[in-house]
Amino acid sequence: MKLFCCQACGQMLFFENVRCERCSRRVGYCSEGATLIALDPADGEGGVGVGGWLPAGGDASAPRMFCVNAEQDACNWLVPAGTEDQFCVACAFNRVIPDLTVEGNLELWRKLEAAKHYLIYSLLLLKLPIKKSVEAADGGLTFDFMDDPLGGEDGQKVMTGHDEGVITVALREANDAEREKMRLEMGEYYRTVLGHFRHEIGHYYWNVLVRDAGQLEACRAVFGDDSQDYGAALTVHYENGPPVGWQATYVSSYATTHPWEDFAETWAHYLHIVDTLQTAMAFGLVVDTTTPEGDGLERHFNFDPYSAGSFDEILKAWLPLTVVVNALNRSMGQADLYPFVITPVIAEKLRFIHQLVHGLPLADAKLEAA
C-alpha cells in the first residue's frame, strides 16, 4: 500500500483516511489516479459537499462525488470522473450486503468493505481484467456479504466461498473473536478478512486466466490435476488432515486439499507479498542484517512490486523483510507476522502466479506435486 500526502497542507495520509488530521479537509480516493485527493466542497466555504467536491486549491474541473456507501462510513472512494454512478469502482461489485438494521451489522460490514477495498486497489494496480457481473454465471465478478440466517435449521451457516464469479463472504468473518475461534479450531497459522478476499479472488482468476485463457495444461504442470473430484478431496482433507511433509511443497495446509485450493492459496500469498513490499518501500524500510561473510541479507530495493518484471526481484526483497517483521512481532510477544516458509517449490508456484498476472511466458518446469 502506498503512502499519500494532503495536497493542501502536506500531511501524510493513509489509504483509509477520510479526513486530513492537520487541515481537516475531506479526502477521497481516486481510483483512476490511484491517489488520495484533498477536497473542498464545491458549494463554497461552509458547504458540506452536497454539490460535489473539488480538489483543494480551486481546481476548475467538474465536481466529484463520493460513493453512496460513504454515507455509512463504509467507503472513502470517489465515483469515476465524468459519470453519474452512485457507487465507486470497488462498491459497484456488491450484490448483497448485510441487513444494517440489525445491531452490530454495520460495524462488521465496514470491516468487510475495508478489506475488499484493499483487494480492489491491488487488482487495479496489477491491471488485471475485472468485469462486473450483470447476471448469474456471466463470467463477471460480484460480492455477497451475508449473515447467518436466524433460526436456521441444524445450525446452518453461510459459507465463505466462490462460485463462477460470485464471492460469498460470511459476515461472522469480520467478528475478530469468531474468526480467531475458527482459526484455532481449523489449526490455521493465519486467518484474516483480507486473506479471505485474496484467496477467493484467486478462484475467480483461475477461471479467467487459466480455464478460460487456455492455460490449463501449464497450470496443471505446476499445481496438479484439477480434474480430480473436489468434494472427495475436501472430505479426505478434513478427515485425515494434510499429508506428512506438506510444508516442503505447499504454502499452507489447506493448499494440500486440491489443486484449486493450492492455486488460490498461492495467489493470496502473492498479493500479500506485493502489497506488503509496497508498504515497506513507501516507508523507506531497508533490511540490513549483514553477516561477516558473503552479502548476507542486506538488500536495498527501489522498484514497484506491482509492476516488477522479475519475480526474483520480488523474492529477494521479501525474504529478508519477513525475517525482520517476524523478529519485531516476537519482541512484542506476538506471533510471527508471516508464519510461512517459502521453499524452492513454493517459490516456483509463486513465480507461476507472477507470470500469469503480468502476462509473461509461463514457466516450462514441471513441479513435483505431493
Image (cartoon, rainbow, N blue to C red):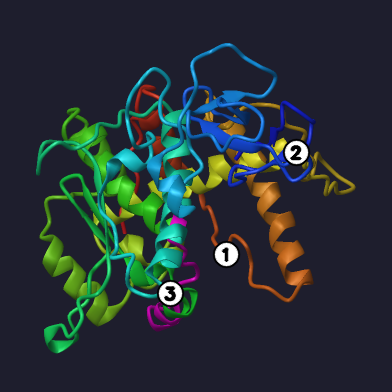
Quadrant position of the C terminus in the picture? bottom left
Mark 1 and mark 2: span between their CA atoms? 30 Å
**Residue hosting label 3:** 179
How many C-alpha atoms fall within 10 Å of the one at disc 1: few (<14), some, or many (≥20)? few
Q: In which quarter of the image is residue 45?
A: top right
**Residue hosting label 1:** 339
Residue closest to the far bottom: 154
Total label count?
Answer: 3
Q: Is mark 3 on a helix, strand or loop?
A: helix
Q: Which of marks 2 and 3 is nearer the N terminus?
A: 2
Q: Position of residue 225 (x, y in %)?
A: 18, 49
In the image, 170 versus 363, the foreground residue is 170
Magenta stretch? 181-194
Residue at the location (31% across, 39% down)?
92
Q: Which of marks 1 and 2 is nearer the N terminus?
A: 2
Q: Which of marks 1 and 3 is in front?
A: 3
Quadrant position of the N terminus in the picture? top right
Residue at the location (27% across, 70% down)?
147
Q: What residue type is labelled 2?
A: Met
Mark 2 and mark 3: span between their CA atoms? 32 Å
Q: What residue type is labelled 1?
A: Pro
Q: What element carries label 1?
A: loop
**Residue hosting label 2:** 12
Q: Which amino acid does label 3 sit on?
A: Arg
Residue at the location (90% across, 47% down)?
292
Left or right: where does residue 304 sit relative to residue 257?
A: right
